[in-house]
Amino acid sequence: MHGQKAFLSGNEAVAAGVRLARPHVIAAYPITPQTTVIERLAEMVEDASLKAEYLHVESEHSALSACIGASAVGARTFTATSSQGLLYMAECLHYTSGGRFPVVMMNANRSLALPWNIYGDQRDSLSLLDCGWIQAYAEDAQESLDLIIQAYAIAEHPDVLTPMMINLDGFVITHTYELVSLPSQEGVDAFLPPFQTVNKMDLDHPMSLAFTAGPAYNQAFKQLQHQALLSASKVILDIEERFGQFFGRNYSGLIETMHCEDAEFILVTLGSVAGTVRPVVERLRSLGVRVGLVRIRYMRPFPDIEIRKALAGAKAVGVLEKDISFGYEGTVFTNVNSALSRSNVKPSRLLNFIGGLGGKDISAADIEHLFLRLKSTDDGETVAFI
Amino acid sequence: MNYPVWQRSFKPPKDLAEYPVGTAFPAGHLVETNASWRSQRPVIDAEKCSSCRICWLLCPDGVIHNTKPEGLEIDYDYCKGCGICAKECRQKAIRMENEGI
Amino acid sequence: MMEKQSHLSEKKISIRNLSDREYFYGHKACPGCGGSLSLRLALKVLGERSYAVVPAGCMSAVGFIFPQMAFTCNAIISTFPGTASMLSGVAAGARALGIKDFHAVGFAGDGGTADIGFQALSGAIDRHDKIIYICYDNEAYMNTGVQKSGLTPIGARTTTSPAGRRLKGALTQKKPMFEIVAAHGIDYAATASVGYPLDYLRKLNYASKVDGTSYIHVFAPCPIGWGYDTSDTISVAKNAVDCGLWYLAEFSEGQFTLNHKPGEFTSVGDYLFGQNRFCHLQEDDLKAIIMERNAKWESICRSWSYS
């Protein structure tokens, strides 16, 4: 089941993964820094290595709307976007998840205007956590490719039937190159069965889809949707285990931890910045400071059990994120804090570090400084911009 | 059957398990009628009717059916009493009668 | 590309050979609704292998209220702006799955076509997607309570263009949607009216055979929104054509063809003042409307062929 290796950017790895997953319909609108994904896909359609209907839609709203239409007749679909485009299709995000259409989308995390900025932060996807999509955050190109393939298996699973968004940090992951292992087409064909669903229009059994439900019935549909997203937790673990058997790469579930078992000071973060944190953790450990890292891989479904377990012994925890819910705190912090407050084991200090907005650099020195803040006993503000 | 009929025995879902997957449901499923909407009902005079089927064509609800070999009949479960059929009939073969209170 | 046939050589659709099957039944549209008639007739022509896409608006609001499903063919509600884009997706998905001999047909209102759905419609025509897009024009946002749309005619009273002492209803002309889609170079476009049902059926039949994008703009009066008796929907729709305020025409292969030329126009005043929404108009408003009609017809007769 092992294929070749290739030197690919994050975006190119996504395109490679999409081709392997054999979608029927691709509908996408260009936006920096997603563009190279759909450019590669267009080239693959041109040389017939990817047999998909490629729709040049005239907006992101139409991109997701077209994917919903295709999914509604039983087709496997893909779209990709970023920041302004993600927000333009916001209505359709709720539509897709409420309609239980397993569309897979790559989102290039990029700052939202205003001010205008094309660089990476995570305000776009984190401001849309409530829309009912599974949300995963990749750290590198390999994980991006693997997540795309796993996404179809997860989203299309009959217990889930929920769309999935794979987030790549703009430019930092989308445009940087690394050596990537490509699964073989035969391997992916065996791993990923064809898309089957009862939730579709069928010429042999006519259906009414995407209907209205009034006050007597509506909440039940929403509750079912919520339960499906919760069910995704277990499905994700099963799919990852299966993926490991097929392709030899094992993932750690909804979160990934480093040195948390005996850590006193833990930084929780997501995406590519974890790659900057890792060497700092190693360095501080070598100096005898018991630090650790939690990288959240899935924000929805939210890994509350896993987070409670990972942070159980810590004295102080910092949540480092590239977003802010204006007027209060970072969204990841809100979610982590909520998970901790449901248990009686809580770190004595829980701090929120807001950084990287609009692509602002976060250096190893910055990270070291955050660990020092966690270690110190000063009563600084809970929410700090770094 | 050329048109759906009222599913009188339909029981609405109570438990979550009884709900459909997704917002998807079989087509052509009617659980209530529209009869209570009307204050007048059309009545076809078979003697005057020439079976030109203009009324059948122009009914917005499609409730005039070509089911009888000798003429047309109206599904009063779904007729709303708009009066288009009576207005458009060239033979003046349809009259609108008041519904009882 | 379209079949190179003249309109006269097609097999004629008539009342006798039109299907007895009902595809839109038990719906909750108002009595006498022109829109529901236009939808019902369209599906009779297009048949059971249709995927109907219906955006937020009158037809979706009355046809899919769980658990009452009024469509008997496959149907799906789209977002308000998304009729044409969802249609493109349906057609592409079915094609990719190897499904053959189907129709992807959309039924959007005037608001969902000329305003919020305009962009997606333009994109679908640009892509030459094989879809049939039907705009049922009741000249306002009727489902939400009669607000002004881009296709509300000048002078019409709506809730957002009220007629009072200072302003007299809608202040702008209808957007020329037929000409706009024609300017895209669409494969086939037509105007129609539920007051001329056989002409509408013929155009539906033609559109069903076009290997490309079709647009049919069907005039569909609304008794509640326009203020006339429910039984008059067909005659109002016919009068609009007979007095020249609406015209029956087609566009294909870059050519406009007028289908119906009234020998003498009937009274515009009778048409307008038979509807409550126009009853505030004065003589000079009527004169202005007639002048506008004359100018349009002069242009039509100058440049469009007639058959």
Image (spheres, coloured by chain):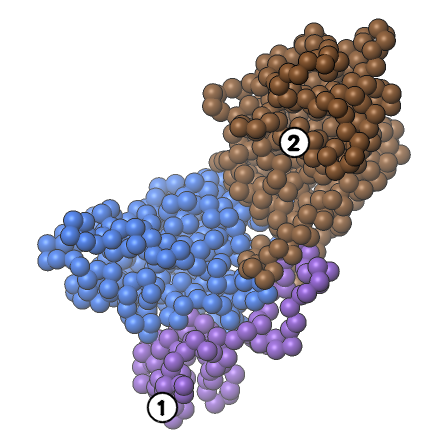
Label 2: which secondary element: helix
User: Residue at coordinates 42% horizontally, 70% vertically from top-left?
Assistant: B60
Which chain can be seen in blue?
Answer: C
The three-letter code of the residue at mark 2 reads Thr
Q: Eyeballing the image, is C154 above or below A310?
A: below
The disc at residue A212 is none
Question: Please, which residue is most extreme toward the bottom here?
Answer: B47
Left or right: B92 in relation to C61:
left
Towards the viewer: C34 or A265: A265
Q: Eyeballing the image, is A120 above or below C97?
A: above
Residue A209 appears in the figure? no
Residue under numbered circle 1: B48
Give residue C195's quadrant in the image.
bottom left
The tally of labels here is: 2
User: Residue at coordinates 47% horizontally, 90% vertically from top-left?
Assistant: B70
Which chain can be seen in purple?
Answer: B
Residue under numbered circle 2: A334
Chain under numbered label 2: A
Label 1: which secondary element: loop
